[in-house]
Image (tube, rainbow, N blue to C red):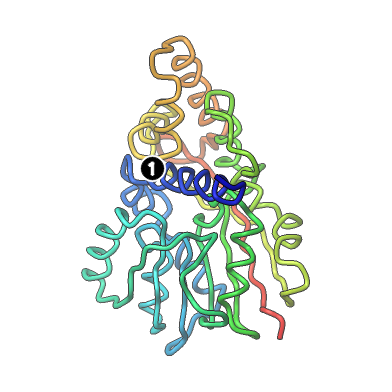
Amino acid sequence: MTMQNSVTEADRALKTKHRAMWAQGDYPSLAAEVIPELGAVLVEACGVRPGQRVLDVAAGSGNAAIPAALAGADVVASDLTPELFEAGRAVAEKQGAHLTWQEADAESLPFGDAEFDTVLSCVGVMFAPHHQQAADELVRVCRPGGTIGLLNWTPQGFIGRMFAVMKPYAPPPPPGAQPPPLWGDEDHVRALLGDRVTDVRAERRTVRVERFETPEAFRDYFKERYGPTISVYKNIAGEPERAAALDAALVDLARDGDLGTGSGGTVLEWEYLLLTARRAG
């Protein structure tokens, strides 16, 4: 077996693992119940208009793709995990949105060069393990003068900190893989896109989350529905002491982040980076 074939097999195995991770739990309900507004925020920032050709990369169940379609665009929602599409199709039908759903790897998109007017991703492409490959694909499929729009959790924000909490309990990352929250670092994203883009606009914002009555409710919700959290607990299955330690650490994270300003329950603010850019001609 050649070195190239070995790399290909390793990459295929990694992607199979990622697909399975996101297929477990219930990410569509989490996106709909906890962060429903984020997709529309990104679509508005990108200035999506009727008649535009739009690609949502790592679209999941269409949190951004559906608002883009409702804005009148011709939308393709692509994701490595097509198991997420069923829930998205149901929401799209209910809202009267018409779009195409297509299985696709963010690091090797099955689309032509300069095929789309807008290429966007809402807390999606950040989970592709090889950041530069994914960024290269975002640029490649966007036409010159078109818009690239990204909304990703920051390393310093709540979800970035959650990944830091889970890291000691997770299996070691494969060679070359980079942490997802780096996509929420402006300097990192600028370096990935390089001089292939202009008119970069970046802003840190927060989304207010009041879904959870207690810190324990937050932990249990993510243990049940969020693929990365489920996978970490599976990694320490049979190690009750470590599982208990992770239980406590996630509760502490939510307790530390609780703003305590709501009428009841836990109030959290999750920080994200909203970045748009224009592909250079």
Tell me: 195 left or right of 124.
right
- Percent of width and height locating residue 92: 27, 69
* Residue shown at 67% from the left, 79% from the top: 279
* Residue shown at 50% from the left, 15% from the top: 245
* Residue shown at 39% from the left, 13% from the top: 238
Among the 4 quarters of the image, the one containing residue 266: top left
Tell me: 141 left or right of 68.
right
Mark 1, Cα crowd under 10 Å, few <14 / some 14-19 / many 20+, is some
- Disc 1 target residue: 211
Q: In the rendered view, tell whether residue 257 sits above or below residue 64.
A: above
Amino acid bearing label 1 = Arg
Please name whichever residue, 158 or 59, is drawn nearer the observer in this view of the structure. Answer: 59
Among the 4 quarters of the image, the one containing residue 225: top left
Please name whichever residue, 40 or 114, is drawn nearer the observer in this view of the structure. Answer: 114
**Count of numbered circles in the view:** 1
- Percent of width and height locating residue 99: 32, 76
